[in-house]
Amino acid sequence: MLKKRIFTLIVLLIIICKTTFTQVKGGFEAIFNVPLGMGITIIHKNVEVQGNPKGKVNFQGGIEANLGYMFQIKEKMGFSLLGVMGYSYTETKYSKYNDTVRYKFIDNDLYFGIMPKFNFYSCSIGLNVGYKITLTPNSSYYTPEIGNIEIKHDIYARLYIRAVFDYSFFVGIDSAVNLGFYIGYDFGNYWSQTSRYLNVVENETFGNVDIGIQFGYRYGPKF
């Protein structure tokens, strides 16, 4: 249901913009990216958490498609409205009690979103916002007493937001190689109930600061 609503919203926005700016030059735009980077886990202070929790650095990667329309504002300047769909491999790690208690979450996610993007000369700045939906969760918990064990990982939609900066190396009238970087945040990871066994409390919440590079291919009109 959530995926259907997001997809419908993206289609409606593109139709509205295309109808509103019928006299504006532009064209269909498609971008295929491979983002690679790292995440830094942040523990929120919304509830009292014991053990002095500390976030860790982790790996992230994936593949992403952006589809939509670019409206040319003037020469070498344009505005794009793109729907976003992708797959991401996301790790989340943090520890407590001087690193003697450790948590690790590995999520294989599908994500859907929308990205308005401002283009000027060969550069572009966009804001990618949407939801991640976990397909195959994999979580582990470690203490010296019991070692490393697998634990249950709840599945739910998680909000993400990402600022994207790209530079396009044009290799034709409507083709370019993109190189860029991104910074953002993944919201919404939390424990749904208190567990003494896992050393967690209800609504103990954490997320990831995302930083990385991306490279890919862009099809569409020049800015």
Image: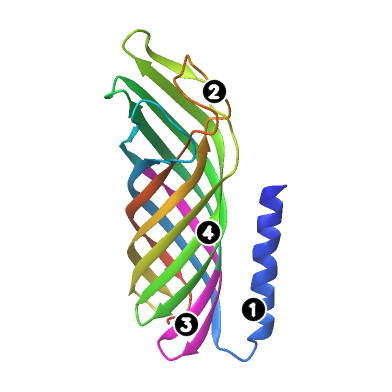
Say if 93 sits above or below 148 in the image.
Answer: below
- Residue at x-position 53% and y-position 30%: 191
Which labelled disc corresponds to residue 194?
2
Q: Earlier in the sequence, mark 1 or mark 2?
A: 1
Residue 179: % across, % down: 32, 64
Residue 190: % across, % down: 52, 35
Spatial CA span between label 1 and label 2 = 47 Å
Kindly identify the amino acid type of the residue bearing the numbered disc 3. Gly
Which labelled disc corresponds to residue 99?
none
Residue 213: % across, % down: 32, 56
Say if 45 sits above or below 106 in the image.
Answer: below
Q: Earlier in the sequence, mark 4 or mark 1?
A: 1
Q: Judge the density around disc 2: few (<14), some (14-19), many (≥20) Cα neighbours within 10 Å.
A: few
- Residue at x-position 41% and y-position 62%: 163
In this view, which residue lies farthest toward the top?
145
Q: Judge the density around disc 3: few (<14), some (14-19), many (≥20) Cα neighbours within 10 Å.
A: many
Mark 1 secondary-structure assignment: helix
Q: Is residue 91 left or right of residue 22?
A: left
Kindly identify the amino acid type of the residue bearing the numbered disc 4. Val
Kindly identify the amino acid type of the residue bearing the numbered disc 2. Thr
Which labelled disc corresponds to residue 129?
4
Quadrant of the rendered structure where residue 19 is? bottom right
Region rendered in magenta: 60-81
Closer mark to the observer between disc 4 and disc 2: 2
